[in-house]
Image (cartoon, helix red, strand yellow):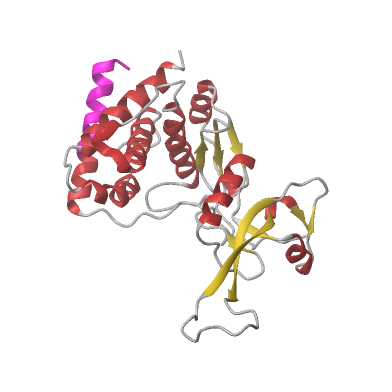
């Protein structure tokens, strides 16, 4: 496909998506089943309560570094209480919890001194991926998955490492890998079949992969500042839309592309050119990924 023709297609897709956004895109929802242990918030397997504060960040980092696909954690004894056993040789992840003690320790004190002492104590937890004997919640059955050979070949030719694990789709810069849920977790929606939804999601992560420092080194500078993460999500989703068109997965922008973009565009109310900047970066990524095929 000639560059001018490709650019024209990308412009058309961008304009159609913008029109959908202006008309009011629907709410986006993931096209695959997830358990109640998603990486979005680590939770304790026994109490079912979400971890808080610095522990959230600590467990996120540990999960990413070790490629855990679920956000369910517990101490060694807690897993035992659930009938599960931590596998030999597994390393625990440290967390912090706080205990509150009265300032008084039996001695007489001024009645006005009603302060308390808060002590931080360390604890260690293990992810559900590190234990045996724990049954994960059953997920609904899904439709049969039909592979799309040209899409599989496209991804393979990029040289990207894709791991099938857990129920979260993400690119991990630390390991330079793409993680995708199992294909059987995907289901058909109003916008596509289970297969189309799988590949659209994988292409989204592939665009993230293209932006690594040793590839396109995609950055957004001071203009977007704290919103750089949202900007990257816009680029990845627009890039996925472009690649879906290149691979013939859809003849026009899928409504869920617009729905996903709408969830991030709210941070750009003060910059009505953000979507065009994202489209430019997405086109560059899509073209670069296509060039890797030659």
Q: Quadrant of residue 133?
A: bottom right
Q: Nearer the viewer, residue 66 or 276?
A: 66
Taking the spot 45% from the left edge, 27% from the top edge, the residue there is 212
What secondary structure characterizes most of the magenta part? helix
**Which quadrant, please, contains the N terminus?**
top left
Magenta stretch: includes residue 100:
no
Q: Quadrant of residue 4?
A: top left
Q: Is residue 13 visible?
A: no
Q: Quadrant of residue 64?
A: top right
Residue bounds of the magenta highlight: 1-15
Number of labels in the image equals 0
* Residue 174 location (% of width, % of height): 55, 33
**Which quadrant, please, contains the C terminus?**
top left
Left or right of 178 on screen, residue 231: left
Residue lying farthest to the right in this orientation? 88
Quick check: 26 above or below 244? below
Residue lying farthest to the top in this orientation? 294
Q: Is residue 58 visible?
A: yes
Taking the spot 16% from the left edge, 42% from the top edge, the residue there is 272
Quick check: 47 above or below 223? below
Left or right of 131 on screen, residue 279: left
* Residue 55 location (% of width, % of height): 56, 56
Left or right of 274 on screen, residue 96: right
Taking the spot 28% from the left edge, 50% from the top edge, the residue there is 262
Q: Nearer the viewer, residue 79 or 186?
A: 79
Q: Nearer the viewer, residue 119 or 249?
A: 119
Left or right of 47 on screen, residue 266: left
* Residue 185 location (% of width, % of height): 56, 51
Magenta stretch: includes residue 3:
yes
* Residue 44 location (% of width, % of height): 62, 64
Quick check: 5 above or below 107? above
């Amino acid at each position: 496909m000639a560059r001018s023709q490709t650019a024209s297609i990308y412009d058309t897709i961008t304009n159609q998506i913008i029109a959908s956004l202006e008309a009011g895109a629907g709410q986006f929802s993931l096209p695959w089943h997830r358990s109640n242990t998603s990486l979005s918030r680590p939770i304790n397997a026994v109490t079912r309560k979400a971890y808080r504060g610095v522990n959230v960040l600590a467990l996120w980092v540990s999960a990413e570094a070790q490629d855990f696909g679920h956000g369910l954690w517990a101490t060694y004894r807690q897993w035992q209480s659930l009938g599960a056993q931590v596998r030999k040789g597994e390393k625990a992840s440290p967390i912090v919890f706080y205990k509150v003690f009265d300032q008084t320790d039996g001695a007489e004190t001024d009645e006005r001194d009603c302060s308390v002492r808060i002590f931080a104590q360390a604890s260690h937890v293990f992810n559900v991926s590190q234990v045996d004997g724990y049954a994960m919640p059953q997920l609904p059955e899904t439709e049969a998955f039909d592979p799309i050979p040209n899409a599989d070949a496209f991804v393979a030719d990029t040289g990207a490492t894709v791991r099938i694990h857990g129920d979260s789709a993400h690119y991990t810069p630390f390991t330079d890998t793409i993680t995708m849920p199992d294909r059987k977790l995907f289901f058909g929606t109003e916008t596509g079949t289970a297969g189309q939804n799988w590949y659209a999601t994988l292409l989204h992560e592939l665009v993230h992969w293209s932006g690594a420092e040793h590839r396109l080194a995609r950055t957004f500078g001071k203009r977007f500042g704290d919103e750089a993460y949202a900007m990257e999500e816009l680029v990845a989703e627009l890039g996925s839309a472009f690649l879906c068109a290149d691979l013939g997965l859809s003849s026009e922008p899928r409504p869920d592309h617009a729905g996903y973009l709408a969830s991030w565009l709210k941070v750009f109310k003060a910059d009505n050119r953000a979507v065009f900047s994202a489209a430019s970066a997405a086109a560059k990524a899509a073209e670069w990924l296509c060039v890797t095929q030659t």
